[in-house]
């Protein structure tokens, strides 16, 4: 029986992290090299953790499915990273960043974790500057900032529209340095297939070499999963093609609780879907909302004329444009949080005011160009405009961008305590893979912050509190015992996949799953829709195991097999998402139940019933999972209806 | 998005079982490709078609599909990342092609990047070069405030331009000498331009060049083909800076 | 340069190519301006020939020049072999030269070989019959110091003229790339100067090659 102990340290909110660090157990330098740590994933959280732990002297093994750690999908983050530096003298503080994050997350995150995140945010900027990250600077040579959604201060640091890339390359360079020194061994093109639990503690992982198909086992005194989110359950998302939820799912099936799977962020500014062969959606940075104005036609006939190609956006005069975000939320305007902006776009399109097949609204820079001049706009967003034009063949300097919400980020993930340890001792989760800091909705420029915070400044401390007691655990033989058994299980699972020998491609089934998820577990969820969705997913899962076709062999490079393995997990994870959404009879952040909304259509929380983290425990195949609740106590900020008016 | 007629295409794809095996071209006919789809989506359609015919799909590298991870790496109609400028393969769109076109798709070909399978190549040499010196030697923690050292905007911007390299390998693929100078110079430049990286600039330049040579990459003969095909427009002026850094470092030895 | 690895490094070898190349470029500039004298006055030209032919400094410079040339050629081959190895055995089925890439830059070796052939021809016709003849005290149709006579003798023959023009065209291509490329290799370049240096290279190559060609053409015309 699993119990959730969040292990929040004693003391005032401001002192919790200091207290923790002052009293935690540490491993002395000579002993560190006797301890093996496995890091799965090499993005901001994984790469930073592997590098930092290597620097400390631990013996680190880092795994990624890509050909190089530099390709992790953290690289695609565009806009920026938040920190409470208050360089702009605009009233920012650690508390304010904490408060904005809690509020932005619709009061569904753990206060102590979020405060720690806000606290270390400043160290992250310093660290990245020292690593050579070329953040944007003003003419005086000091760091520049821009604004992001959900905040009334400018606290976002950025490197053109490639902030994620630059931060990841910073972590990658630190990781490369450790690889060169031999403290970290890198295993690229290697996929984690399962974790190994011995006597209740996580002791290692089993992997598949994606080139040779070889199944190997690796021992670690502790294992960190930094494997990102599971947005690709929806097939179409802003995630990378290879992003998957398998590592987290395997951990779940071995006993780690999975928290809040229904909290999925839908990003308001993505390039709309163009056709049935579309493989992914491209995000247009939230930073565009600094200067771009979002609108839909006021008159349904105008919207229809645009859809039919009879009118162009430019033909609609200002008085016939509905700047619906500015209209509904005058205080925050176009810079409302993502969940609010996404729902507002959906609301307009559902009422027939959408353009481009009805599934798009406009993001217009005409006004910014009039106000600032084309040069300034180009300097700020040039590379994003170029990207938009390459994809759509439309010039955003002349005609407004068309945007629509798309699946972007998963706030839910593996349940972790304050130390980022899961319910399996020795198994830790970091970055998007865990559920900890964003509650029900993540603010822009906070994902990079959280990934790096976990990797650089949290795990290197908290993991030692666990490892200090593991000094006497000898390295285990990975060819016998539990390791050998898990290897056999993995081989059997692959064999089962290969032996289906059906007629359907993996992608075709994945697309079907995506449709079900988007229709029934998407932006607006209902009880009936979710119940039907669960049934459909179960049927699709049966179909998958009866009809999927994987050409080639298992003991060689086999991309279809890789995909099938991931989709098999998505087919189970999708159901858990729906189940979680069904049980959470309220609307909060990224989770919107149509039954629970205010008269104005805003999310309506049910704090008396649902102010908890819903953590699901696996109980076996075709058995309903068990829900554990971690009550959320708000001692330092008052639970309020979010108001961005 | 403009509505244009769908395309029928002949796609000539390089097939190669493994690194040691001989490869060959395979010709496939594709029908009804939307000009608004990306090149890789066209490849998805091709693979779907192959799977439905009971054949093995074409292996190719790709991941983020938004032009930043650097994983996609196809040599299309004689150009690294295809005929469009400043895009990666995943950002190349089919509207760049005409109905009835024959498209030749090859892997990066260079001794430094051996083929793994079909269109997939091994670029781990880049990681080895990075591990030799592509970093600033700072540990986590104990660093000064981010604003402690002001950096002239010009230098920061120039460093950013160099840092925009995505490590895709188009420069090596397109260089007649299989030289990795643009890749190495971008990293050396970025870090040499910043005061934080200046401190070990000499050591870095020597270490990275030595590793690059050791791994068998060719010499730069300043053709500029790398810059022309670089999806991020990294300038060969970085190569001049690398030369400068390297020569100064060597003369000081 | 205490480090023995300098010349085994790729940039070290390229540095040697650049330095020798720049040295040869200076020599060409000098040679071209000397040649121009022949257009205006045979006597003056012969005076220059006589001065250089008997001057030990000039002889020493010739030796250095010869060594420089040999190093330039030797390393050209060493680098080319290395580069073709780095390129690998698999050739692209189709490869298009991007518009911004100079044709010359991709054909420097072949251009160099044409230039080398030209040099061999030129040396056998002039240097061997002049400076070498003077040193070895050989006797030929014309006096070793009568450069003007040798000029009008050879350049009255049209096949020689054609060979020289081909040689000079190759030299022009070689120089347009070689000049800025040498500066780039020694690190003397940046984003602003890159286009400027390319332009200077073109102007320089054009002036030098036209100067050489002028002597050949004027001599040929005079023989008609």
Image (cartoon, helix red, strand yellow):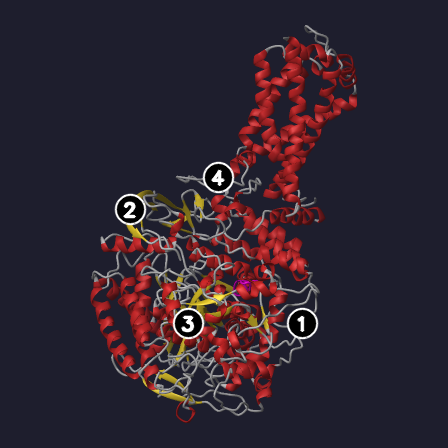
> How dense is the environment of label 3, judged by Cα within 10 Å: few (below 14), some, or many (20 and up)?
many
Res A19 visible: yes
Quickly name the residue at label 4: C97
Q: Residue furthest top?
A: C141
SS under mark 4: loop
x%, y% of residue C56? 78, 21
Label 1, on which residue?
B145
For residue A593, which quarter of the picture? bottom left
How many other residues sit within 10 Å of disc 4, few (<14), some (14-19) or many (≥20)? Answer: some
The residue labelled by disc 3 is A229
Q: Residue at x 60, y 10 (%)?
A: C157
Q: Are marks 4 and 2 on the same chain?
A: no
Residue at 40% from the left image edge and 43% from the top image edge: B77
State the extent of the magenta-drawn residues as a range.
Answer: A160-166
**Chain letter of disc 1 in the image:** B
Q: In the image, C41: left or right of A341? A: right
Give a yes or no on whether discs 3 and 2 share a subunit: no
């Amino acid at each position: 029986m699993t119990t959730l102990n969040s292990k929040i340290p004693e003391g005032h909110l401001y002192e919790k992290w200091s207290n923790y660090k002052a009293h935690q157990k540490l491993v002395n330098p000579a002993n560190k090299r006797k301890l093996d740590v496995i890091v799965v994933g090499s993005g901001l959280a994984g790469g930073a953790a592997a590098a930092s732990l290597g620097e400390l002297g631990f013996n680190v093994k880092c795994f990624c499915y890509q050909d190089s750690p530099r390709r992790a999908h953290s690289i695609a983050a565009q806009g920026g990273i938040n920190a409470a530096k208050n360089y702009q003298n605009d009233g920012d503080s650690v508390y304010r960043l904490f408060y904005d994050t809690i509020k932005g997350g619709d009061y569904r995150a753990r206060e102590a974790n979020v405060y720690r995140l806000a606290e270390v945010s400043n160290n992250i900027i310093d660290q990245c500057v020292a690593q050579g990250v070329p953040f944007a600077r003003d003419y005086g040579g000091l760091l520049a900032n821009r604004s992001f959604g959900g905040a009334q201060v400018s606290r976002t640091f950025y490197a053109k529209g490639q902030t994620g890339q630059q931060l990841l390359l910073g972590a990658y360079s630190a990781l490369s340095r450790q690889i060169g020194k031999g403290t970290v061994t890198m295993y690229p093109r290697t996929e984690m297939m399962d974790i190994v639990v011995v006597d209740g503690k996580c002791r290692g992982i089993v992997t598949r070499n994606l080139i040779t198909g070889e199944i190997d086992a690796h021992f670690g005194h502790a294992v960190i999963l930094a494997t990102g989110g599971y947005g690709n359950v929806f097939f179409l998302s802003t995630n990378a093609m290879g992003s998957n939820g398998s590592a987290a799912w395997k951990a779940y099936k071995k006993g780690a609780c999975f928290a809040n799977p229904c909290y999925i962020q839908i990003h308001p500014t993505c390039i709309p879907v163009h056709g049935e062969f579309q493989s992914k959606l491209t995000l247009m940075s939230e930073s565009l909302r600094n200067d771009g104005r979002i609108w839909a036609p006021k008159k349904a006939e105008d919207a229809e004329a645009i859809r039919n190609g009879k009118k162009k956006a430019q033909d609609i005069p200002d008085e016939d444009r509905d700047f619906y975000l500015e209209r509904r939320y005058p205080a925050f305007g176009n810079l409302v949080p993502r969940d609010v902006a996404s729902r507002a776009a959906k609301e307009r399109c559902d009422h027939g005011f959408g353009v481009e097949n009805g599934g798009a609204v406009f993001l217009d820079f005409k006004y910014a160009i009039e106000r600032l001049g084309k040069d300034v706009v180009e300097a700020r967003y040039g590379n994003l405009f170029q990207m938009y034009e390459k994809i759509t063949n439309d010039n955003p300097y002349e005609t407004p961008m068309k945007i629509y919400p798309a699946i972007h980020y998963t706030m839910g993930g593996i349940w972790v305590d304050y130390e980022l340890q899961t319910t399996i001792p020795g198994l830790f989760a970091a970055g998007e893979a865990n559920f900890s800091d964003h509650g029900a909705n993540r603010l822009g420029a906070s994902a990079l912050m959280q990934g790096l915070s976990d990797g650089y400044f949290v795990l290197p401390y908290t993991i030692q509190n666990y490892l200090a007691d593991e000094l006497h655990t000898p390295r285990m033989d990975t060819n016998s015992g539990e390791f050998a058994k898990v290897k056999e299980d993995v081989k059997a699972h692959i064999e089962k996949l290969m032996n289906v020998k059906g007629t359907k491609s993996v992608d075709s089934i994945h697309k079907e799953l995506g449709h079900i998820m988007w229709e029934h577990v998407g932006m607006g969820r209902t009880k009936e829709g979710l119940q039907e969705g669960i049934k459909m997913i179960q049927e699709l899962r049966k179909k998958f195991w009866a009809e999927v076709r994987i050409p080639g062999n298992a003991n060689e490079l086999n991309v279809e097999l890789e995909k099938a393995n991931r989709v098999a997990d998505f087919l189970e994870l999708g159901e858990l998402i729906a189940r979680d959404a069904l049980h959470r009879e309220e609307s909060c952040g990224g989770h919107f139940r149509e039954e629970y909304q205010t008269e104005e259509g805003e999310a309506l929380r049910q704090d008396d019933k649902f102010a908890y983290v819903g953590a699901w425990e696996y109980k076996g195949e075709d058995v309903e999972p068990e829900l554990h609740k971690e009550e959320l106590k708000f001692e330092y900020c008052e639970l309020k209806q979010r108001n961005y008016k | 998005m403009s509505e244009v007629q769908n395309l029928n295409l002949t796609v000539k794809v390089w097939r190669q079982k493994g690194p040691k095996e001989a490869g060959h071209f395979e010709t496939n006919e594709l029908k009804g490709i939307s000009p608004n789809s990306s090149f890789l989506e066209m490849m998805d359609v091709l693979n779907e078609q192959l799977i439905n015919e009971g054949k093995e799909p074409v292996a190719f590298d790709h991941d983020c599909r938004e032009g930043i991870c650097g994983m996609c790496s196809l040599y299309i109609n004689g150009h690294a990342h295809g005929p469009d400028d400043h895009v990666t393969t995943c950002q190349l769109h089919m509207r760049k092609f005409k109905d009835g076109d024959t498209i030749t798709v090859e892997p990066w070909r260079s001794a430094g990047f051996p083929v793994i399978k079909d269109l997939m190549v091994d670029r781990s040499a880049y990681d080895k070069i990075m591990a030799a010196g592509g970093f600033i030697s700072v540990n986590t923690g104990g660093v000064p405030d981010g604003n402690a050292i002001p950096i002239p905007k010009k230098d920061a911007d120039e460093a950013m331009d160099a840092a925009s390299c995505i490590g895709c390998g188009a420069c090596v693929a397109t260089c007649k000498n299989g030289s990795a100078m643009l890749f190495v110079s971008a990293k050396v430049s970025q870090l040499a331009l910043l005061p934080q990286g200046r401190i070990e600039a000499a050591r870095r330049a020597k270490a990275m060049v030595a590793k690059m040579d050791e791994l068998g990459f060719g010499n730069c003969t300043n053709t500029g083909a790398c810059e022309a095909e670089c999806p991020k427009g990294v300038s060969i002026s970085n190569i001049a800076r690398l030369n400068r850094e390297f020569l100064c470092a060597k003369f000081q030895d | 340069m205490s480090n023995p690895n300098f010349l085994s490094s790729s940039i070290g070898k390229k540095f040697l190519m650049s330095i020798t190349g720049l040295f040869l470029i200076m020599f060409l500039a000098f040679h071209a301006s000397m040649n121009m004298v022949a257009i205006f006055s045979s006597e003056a030209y012969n005076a220059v020939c006589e001065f250089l032919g008997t001057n030990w400094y000039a002889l020493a410079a010739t030796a250095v020049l010869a060594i420089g040339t040999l190093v330039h050629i030797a390393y050209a081959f060493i680098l080319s072999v290395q580069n073709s190895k780095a390129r690998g055995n698999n050739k692209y089925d189709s490869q298009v030269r991007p518009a911004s890439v100079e044709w010359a830059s991709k054909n420097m070796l072949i251009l160099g070989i044409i230039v080398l052939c030209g040099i061999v021809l030129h040396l056998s016709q002039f240097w061997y019959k002049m400076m070498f003849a003077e040193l070895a005290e050989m006797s030929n149709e014309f006096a070793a110091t009568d450069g003007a006579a040798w000029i009008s003798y050879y350049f009255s023959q049209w096949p020689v003229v054609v060979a020289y023009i081909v040689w000079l065209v190759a030299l022009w291509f070689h120089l347009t790339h070689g000049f800025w490329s040498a500066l780039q290799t020694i690190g003397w370049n940046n984003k602003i100067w890159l286009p400027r240096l390319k332009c200077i290279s073109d102007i320089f190559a054009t002036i030098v090659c036209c100067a050489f060609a002028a002597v050949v053409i004027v001599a040929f015309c005079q023989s008609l």
